[in-house]
Image: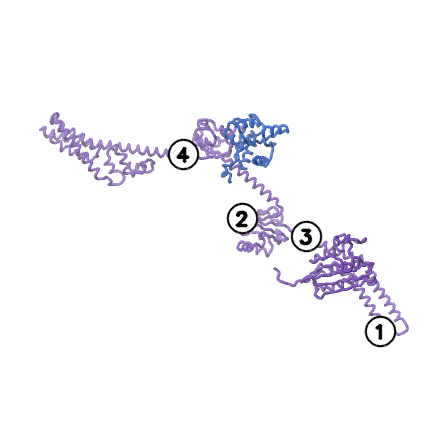
Amino acid sequence: MQERRVDSGYRKAASPADDVPARQTGRQAVVPGGDAGGHAGGLGAAGQSTSSPARMRYFWAVLTVLIAFATRWALVPVLDDRSPYIIFVLAVLASALFLGRKPAILAAGLSIAVGLPFLLANRASSSVMFTQTAMFAVVCAGVIYLAKRLADKGALAEQNRAVAVAEAARRRIVDEEMHLLLNGVEHYAIFLLNADGSIRNWNRSAERVYGWSADEIVGKPLSVLRQNDGGNGEVGTSAQLEQARRGSFRSDVWQLRKDGSEFLATVTLSPLTDPSGVVRGFAKMIYDNTEERASRQALEKREQLLTSILATVPAAMIVIDDRGVIASFSAAAERLFGYPEAEMIGKNVNLLMPDPDRQRHDSYIRRYLETGEAHIIGIGRIVSGRRADGSTFPMKLSIGETASGDQHLFTGFIQDLTEQREFEARLEQTKAELLHVSRISAMGTMASTLAHEINQPLTAIAAYGEAIADLLSGEAEPDREVLASAFVDMSQQAIRAGAIVQRMREFVGRGEAARSIEDLPALINEASVLALLGTRERGILPQFFYAADATPVFVDRVQIQQVLVNLMRNAIEAMEGSPVRNLSVSTGLLDEDTVQIIVADTGAGLDPAIRGRLFDAFATTKSNGMGLGLSICRTIVEAHEGRIFARDAQGGGTEFVFTLKKPRLPRDEE
Amino acid sequence: MDMIATIAVRKRILLVEDDAAIRRALQLLLTGEGYDVRSYARATGLSCDPEALSADFLIADLILPDGDAFELLEKLRAAGWPGAAVLISGYLTPERVRSALRAGFVRVLAKPFRDTELARAIVELLRP
């Protein structure tokens, strides 16, 4: 039914009628036209005709008949019995047009009844009377029918009008919204081009972006919106339109404003084709993205700078996430470990560790994340790394913690200590060589003394030998006791020589640089064997004072004996020409784990010229010395965690003092 | 980026350079540094244009298709423009530099210059 379609149309329309329920709307639309009652009954849902207006209509219908009756009655003198019903047609017509079908039928019936007197006043034949009545009835029927048709048409026209109004309203809203869209946005503009590329329409957004007003720009070619300097390789306007014709064109293009200034925009040209496929025009959409492009460029520049800086960082750098998975592996790391970055990303970093760290690393990370205790993060440690070829090497590892977005990351910087270790090892070796060489050299300076000292026992042995030979080759029976004591003396001399040789061998031996627990008095006694060679004749009086608690010490035996020999011989030389020549070596306990040894002489004292530089290398007042002795003593003593210094002795002479460590009792290592 | 947020306090630079490649590169560079840039290929009409006159700085190429930077600066000053001006050129001689400084250009940069040189020059102009 047409009415129902109109209903749904009404509901969608934006017209004010929207708020009114459909039924009343229909009535509102139709009443000015005509037959309201019947349509109200037919519209929408069933049974909405209210009874009182309908009753009113019947009342009006009756009233029109009565009016007609009165009129006809008034006209009796004029009309007599002619045209009895004609006036009633008006009543029926009025009822049909204004009151509805049923009231009209009532009016018709009532008219026939009420008009009878006029009819009968005639005394015409019954056939005439009947014909007149019948004709009146037919006319009424026709009038009622036509009135209804008229009303229907009117209603239909009204509905169409209402639909058109609603449609127009809707379109207006859409237009307004489109208008707002096209004119309100900033930085965007959409407008239409003709098929030849000239500008077809314009709006305020486009005006804001380009500066041109609609009057100025509509009809002009598209190229007006661009700089006409060839564009450095940008696609020309006609080429853009060509591309758009074939599909669409989209690119960043520099645009020109009315005032001559430029901006960069993303331009999209879309073809508008009609159903037959002919391109009727184009839609041009632009977005001013100068800022975006500028900031992207600036960002890229910064990123490049950062990347190139990181690439030149000499330390190997590895970034891992909180599961130990490698996220980044620098060029230096590639060289150090022997894996390319592409291979390492995604693998667990424990691949680069030897056992046991390899198995434990995941738990190290977990422990840190749970407890927050740093064992290496922010502290740095020396650990072992494992190269691709399986070899391990020492490395210094520093780890920092960082977060990026929601990711927990750890950055590790690795310093390869292999070279450093090798260097240190070589250095140690060189030092040991130096000490060794100086020992040999010390022996060298004592060569004549040594020779003399060894020669004496040998001479004595020779003498004894000759004496024994004489005794045995003589006539007399040799006295057994005399022989025995001669042999005993001989072997003692041999032992004496042997001891000196033994001492010497030990002294100049390279020796393993090993420390051991030594009895200090024994150590000093052995050293003094060499140191005091040849001093008996010179009248030097050696004295040894050993404190009972100043022993044992944890030292490199040969090296400390080197120090003692050096100090004692220096002391002996210092006393050359002195009236009193007392050499004393004493030990004492300085504190719980430190022992102090003093080598004192009664010589001339320290030369003021050299006092400050006593322990420096190459510092000497001797004409034939390199001056290395005391500097080497200092090196040895300090390597033993001790101190060495010199001071004037009370009553004249010099004291050289140095300290050594007692062995530490074993306790739990951390 | 926060640049949009600071739009209210951005300094405006008037850039006049007829070489499109240089002009566009400078526009993007200076926009990326946070300035509001109006770039033009020629000087015509700038001294009457309120957009141009609202600029804080001028960067102009010495030789322009419709005149030169000196004329432009003169016209801008005549229109009451108080901003600081920088001259750029690939054909600088000591004499030209002197006349530029006399004419009121605060800095003179010889092309080609590094991005950082220009950026620094502007920053120095910002200092009171």
Q: Distance between the residues labelled 4 and 2?
A: 47 Å
Quadrant housing residue A33: top left
**Quadrant of the rendering where the N terminus of chain A is positioned:** top left
Chain shaded blue: B
SS under mark 4:
helix
Report the disc number at residue A422: 3
SS under mark 1:
helix
Chain shaded purple: A
Query: Residue A592 or A474: which is nearer the viewer?
Result: A592
Q: Mark 1 points at which residue?
A: A481
| In this rendering, the label closer to the viewer, 1 or 3 | 1
Report the disc number at residue A178: 4
Do tags 1 and 2 sit on the same chain?
A: yes
Do tags 1 and 4 sit on the same chain?
A: yes
Residue closest to the far front: A651
- Tell me: residue A551, above or below residue A63: below
* Residue A274 position within the rendered picture, expressed as x and y whole percent measured from the top left: 41, 31
Task: Report the amino acid beneath label 2.
Answer: Ala
- Dot 1 or dot 4: first in sequence order is 4
Q: Name the residue under label 2.
A: A403
* Residue A30 position within the rendered picture, expressed as x and y whole percent measured from the top left: 26, 34
